[in-house]
Every structure is written in C-alpha cells, then in structure tokens.
Amino acid sequence: MASQILEIPNKSLNREKKVLVVDNNPVMLSFMNNLLVSHGYQVSTAEDGLAVLKILETERPDVIVTDLIMPNISGEKLCRTIRKMPHLKDVYVIILSGVAAEHESDLAELGANVCIAKGSFNKMSERIMEALDRLDSSAPHVFANEIIGIHDTSPRDIAKELLSLKGHLEVILSSMSDGIFEITAEGDIIYANPTATSIVDLPEEMLLASNVLQLFHEGDRMKVDKLFKSGEKTAPNANGSSYRLVNGKDVSLSILPIKDEENKIIVILKDLSDRKVLEARLRQAHKIEAIGTLAGGIAHDFNNLLMGIQGYASLILFDMNTNHPHYEKLKRIEDHVRSGAELTKQLLGFARGGRYEVAVADLNEIVEKTSTMFGRTKKEITIQRKFEENLWTVEVDRGQIEQVFLNLYVNAWQAMPGGGDIYLETSNATINKGYMKPFYVKPGRYVKVSVTDTGIGMDEKTKERIFEPFFTTKEMGRGTGLGLASVYGIIKGHNGIINVYSEKGHGATFTVYLPASEKEFVKEAQVSADVVKGDGTILLVDDEEMIVEVSRELLEVLGYRVHVAKNGRDAVEIYREKQREIDVVILDMIMPGMGGGETFDALKSINPDVRVILSSGYSINGKAKEIMKRGCKSFIQKPFQMGDLSDKIKKVLD
Amino acid sequence: MGSSKEESISVRQMAENVGLKEEEYVPLLVLFIETSICYLNELKSDILKGDSRKVYETIHSIRGAAENLGIPEMSEIAKVMELKARKDVLDGAEEARETLVEKLGYLTEVSHLRYN
C-alpha cells in the first residue's frame, strides 16, 4: 500500500530532471520535496508565484508543480506567464489544487499539462507520479482538459464562490481606465491590470516579478522610490507631479499603501500623454481665437486707413472733370481701396467665426467671386471655370461658404508648389438614396461644386484623415490643420457633403454637395454711386481724427452742416443741446469709453425717433446687428465712398 | 488522552491512512502543527478585527493540510468555518478556532510522546 508509492522505480532515470514545486503550505512543500527526491528528482520549492518568477530568471526546471490559490501571483497567472516566456514554453506544468475542479476558466487554456485535485497524500502521490511518468514516455505533451482525482475534491461551493468573486473583481480591474499595479514592499510587481500593461507598453509576463522602478526614466527613479517609501497615501497628481516612463510617456501616480505585515502598495497610474495632447489642442484653439480677435482689430484699423484714402480720393474726384489727366489714376486708387476693403472683409469673416446667417445664394456667383479674388493673389495659378447656366439656388451662410471655397483653393494651390491649373465646375445633381447612405443626408436635389487641382495628390492614409481637425501634411508651424476641418464642419452644418478623390501624383478633386433651394436668388441692389447733394445738419461722432476730418469734408461737400463729437459723452451733450437742429447722427461703433451702443441708447432716451447711421470698420454682424435691432436706422461700413454716404443719408432722411 | 501505546498506534494508523510510513508521516505532522499554531494565532486577531477574507484564506490553508494528512476531525471543522467566512459570517468562528486549538493540542501530545 503506502510504501508501494514511495518505492523508487527509476531513480537513475530521473536524476537529471528538475522539478519546481510551488505551494504556500509548508506541509505540502515538505511532502512533495520528500516524494520527489525519493524518486530521484532534483527539487526546488517556492512559496508563491512571485518567488517562482524570481527563480525562473536563473533556472529552467523540467517540471513545475503549482497550486492555484496562492498569495501574491496566483497559480493561474503564473501558468499563463510561464507559457508566454519563450524559454519556458516546453516546461511540463502540473496544477495541483484543491479547487481545480471549481475553476471556471479552461485549465488547458492556462497551459497546464496535467491538473490534479488535492486530496490525501496517498492518492495525490499516486497521481503525481503517474503524471511524471507521462513526461518520461514518448507520448506528446498535451494540455490538460480533465482533472485527475476530481471526486476527492471538497468544499466545491466555497471555492466556486471564491473564484467567481475573484473573476468579478478581475473584470472590474481589467476594465478600469487607470493603470493599476500591486507591488511588494521591495517594489516587485505582483499584479498589473491591462491598462497598466498598455501604458508601460510591456506584456504582463515581462512585468510580473520585475521591479517597478525599472519602468521609470532614470532621472525620475529616485523621486518615484521616495514616493513609494513615504508610506503615505497620495491622491492622483496631488501636487501636479508627473513622472516620465522609459517609453517616454508621462504619468501621474497615486499611492495606496496597504497597512499590513507585508506592506504591499497599490500604485495607480494615469497616462498624461493624452491629456497633454488635448491641452495642446485647446491652446491651439485659443491661439486661433486670439488670432481671430487680432485679425478683427487689424481689419478695423485698416478700414479706417482706407476710409481716409477713399474719402480724400472721393473729394478730389467730386469736382474733377473726367478728362482731367489725373481722373483715371484717382479712379484706380478707388479700385485699390475697394480691393483692400475686400481683404479686410475676409479678415473680419475669419474673426466672426461660426455665426450662421442663412440666405438664398447663387453658388456660381460665390465661386466666381471667390476664385477671382484668389486668382488675383496667386498669379502662378490658372483658374478654369465650367459653370452650369441654370444652377439651382442654395440657402447658405454666404461668409462661411466663401470661406469653404477659399480654403479649397488654398489647399489646391499648396498641392501645386510650382503652379498649375485649378478646375472649377458647378452642376445640378439629383442624388438617390444609395449614394447618400454613408453620409447621413437626405436624398434629393443638390448643387454640386468640384474643385480639382493637378497637384501632388494624396495617398489613402492622408485621404482618410484629411478632414480631421489639426491634421496637416505641412511641416510644423506652417499649417494649422484647421482649414479642411472647418470646410468639413461648415458643409456638414449646411446638411451637405464633401468628398475627396485623389491618387498620389495625380491631383485631387474635392466635391461639395449643398442642398438645393426652391427659393429664387435676388441679387442685392447695388448701392448707387451717384452723389446726391442734400440739406440738413449732421452730428458726426468718431474718435479717429482722420475719419472726422475726411468725413466732415465729404459731408460739407454734399451740402450738410456738420457738428463733431470726439466721443460718446460729447455726442450726448451736443445732441441734448441741439436735437431740434440735428437731422442725422453718424455714429462710430467702436470708441473708447462710451461706445457706439451705449451712446445710441443715450440718444434714444433723449429722442426715441433719433435718426442714427451706425458707422464701423467692423462688419454689420455681431455688435452692429444688435444695435440695429434696438432701432438704429442704417449702417455704413468703412471705407465708404461719397456716393454711398449721400445715398445712406438721403434714405434715412426720407 | 489514552495510553502511550494507543497513541503510537493512532499515529501509525493516521500515516497508513494517507499511504505513508510512520517515520515519513510524523515530520509532516510536526510541520503541520507548527504552521497551524501560527495560523491559529493569526486567526484569533483576524476574527477580532472582523477580517473575514483573511480568516477565509488562513482557514483554507489549515483545511487543505489537514485533508492531506488525513485529519478529518480538524478538516471538517475548518471546512464549516471556511464556508461561513466566505459568506462574511464570523459568528461562532472563535469557538471553532478554540476547538481547532484543542485538536491541535491533542496532535501535539501524540507526536511529542512518540518522538520524545
């Protein structure tokens, strides 16, 4: 009986075989040691998974006999880790456990060759020796799919509960967005959740039993070590500190020391790299906003300068005979002022950002206008146009759509560093359900505009990302990566679609589809440039000396008497005194101290029927529009010509 | 306790029950007693602290070793205690622990007498 088991049948055969036994129960270790040594095996023992991994750094056993439930690194984790180590792939693994039968995971999947249920020593030793005999046979090693001695297992319900609870906690830990390490007081890793392995870019088998400090950049190791040794619980990023890992990532650390005899530590890592990218994007967005504000300010000042040039040109032209040798030259100055004003309008449009004012529009006209303007600035580009004559109308925010096409032209121009052709084509398109499906827009009538360049083209990867915000193929500092992203955003905001067709080296075509409108486009009435003389008294309110001078002269030439106020407060004073005499107030919108809006409200409180023309270097959108809503009669954008001014005053007086 | 002769037979019987020679069995029994003394001391403070998880883990070890060595009078008590601790129930745990201490005392005497 018992003695039979401990006989030594093939002691010499086994002399070479090394067996590593892992169990936290010293009785079990002692028994196994006696049993195996008596059968001629070389035996080493370990009390838990962590100790095993340390041993395996220098030794390669032929057989590992392991328990499943152990402190630190469990038997299950140990098996998986062993199987992932290339030099231990062929080691023969025997699981010896009282709870093997209750294990809900596939034991073969763990990589065990044999699973033996624990029980009394006699039965257990028979099975262990049988299993070891299999190793000596020529039969191929297969992973276990059955548990030997299952009928001997006891408190199954208890173990099942334990394992399912453990499984539940494992699921929670695995799904956490923070990285979690459990380390010993010496810093050896005994647990790492999947997020932690992904943050440090190392697989679990390489992490377990390695020292956590090795994961940190050399310069930060002392700091991290000090943090671990402090024994203090710390909140994540409590002092704003970040620590650099060897893989270059920055992490914040939160420490939870476990106050027991083993003094283990739970370390929570947060990857700060993503946050840093987001912060950079936010900074970029703020920068764009700041540039917008700056651009708006520049446009305002620039319009005032243009106002001076325009005003004096108008004054000279007013009395000049068309045969005068300087007449044409002065007319050219007016043209250049107009071009300058167009440019500032673009800047103001950029500064305006995101406002959405829909009106019926003709895309032929918008494409024509924007491309002409673009073509003037880029002489190396030839623009070819093919427009549908009876193009359906669209309902769009004109400023935004102009921005879309300008961005597409700029993109085309950048794709053709040595110059080339841009082909613009407009057409009507009825689009069916099938085509629209991937774009989540309604089928129906659309106006199609395509912008084609003959440039360098794009590869598939670039095409996939071309509309992503902040994506740019240009070197750092040259492109914001916002151009095509804003194009995409604007078109989407108009319930339209944009797609791109391109092949590397063969140019690109961006096609925009915008929903067609049933409404008719009515061209904005052109302001009459004819100068009509008038009669009356004007209160001119502006803080800019140059504007005051030129405007006063223009008004006097037109036949009006002029009172001047250099700020809002003076304007209110003068109006209070001379309201019976003053017919119209021309009021600048942006002034230091009491601005145009506040001044308008004060004038209105003196006379609810006060006739005010708001004047601004900014566009009518934004603040001006609000003042108009409060009852202001008219708006004139600087720089204005004498004809515009006489027309506006006349309309207000009528 | 019975006579020295009876006890000696009892240990031999226990060894035979698990397929071991008496001289192989007794050192394991001594080791079991030594570790169990530590475990039972730990259990006392864990029960007082109400740390049912720790109680479970410790009693699980005692139960396993008792089964290995074929000591049902200890493994059965441990099994019940283990089941309850798993369910966070520590009522009666101290009484069960004291019973195990008594049983261990008996085993200590048996092994001591035989090998002194």
Image: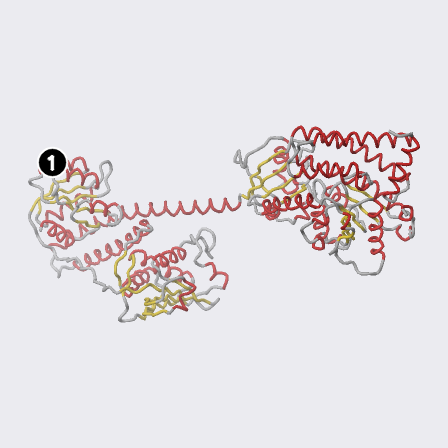
Give the image location of residue B21, x and y in percent.
Answer: 91, 41
Q: Residue furthest front?
A: B2
What amino acid is found at the position of numbered circle 1 in the picture? Arg
**Position of A467 relative to B22 (above/below):** below
Q: Is residue A418 left or right of residue A191?
A: left
Q: Is residue A615 left or right of residue B85?
A: left
Residue at image location 26% in from the left, 58% down from the top: A359
**Position of A321 relative to A544 (above/below):** below
Corner quadrant of residue A120 = top right
Residue at image location 19% in from the left, 49% down from the top: A635
Give the image location of residue A437, x and y in percent.
Answer: 42, 65
Task: State the scheme by which the image is colored.
Answer: secondary structure
Instruction: Please name whichever residue, A639 or A244, is drawn nearer the observer in this view of the structure.
Output: A244
Give the image location of residue A399, x and y in percent.
Answer: 29, 56
Instruction: Tell me which chain the residue with mark 1 is part of.
Output: A
Residue at image location 84% in from the left, 60% down from the top: A138
Which residue position is annotated with label 1?
Answer: A576
Instruction: Please name whichever residue, A451 or A199, is drawn nearer the observer in this view of the structure.
Output: A199
Secondary element at tag 1: helix
Q: Is residue A629 left or right of residue B36?
A: left
Instruction: Please name whichever residue, A78 or A539, is drawn nearer the observer in this view of the structure.
Output: A78
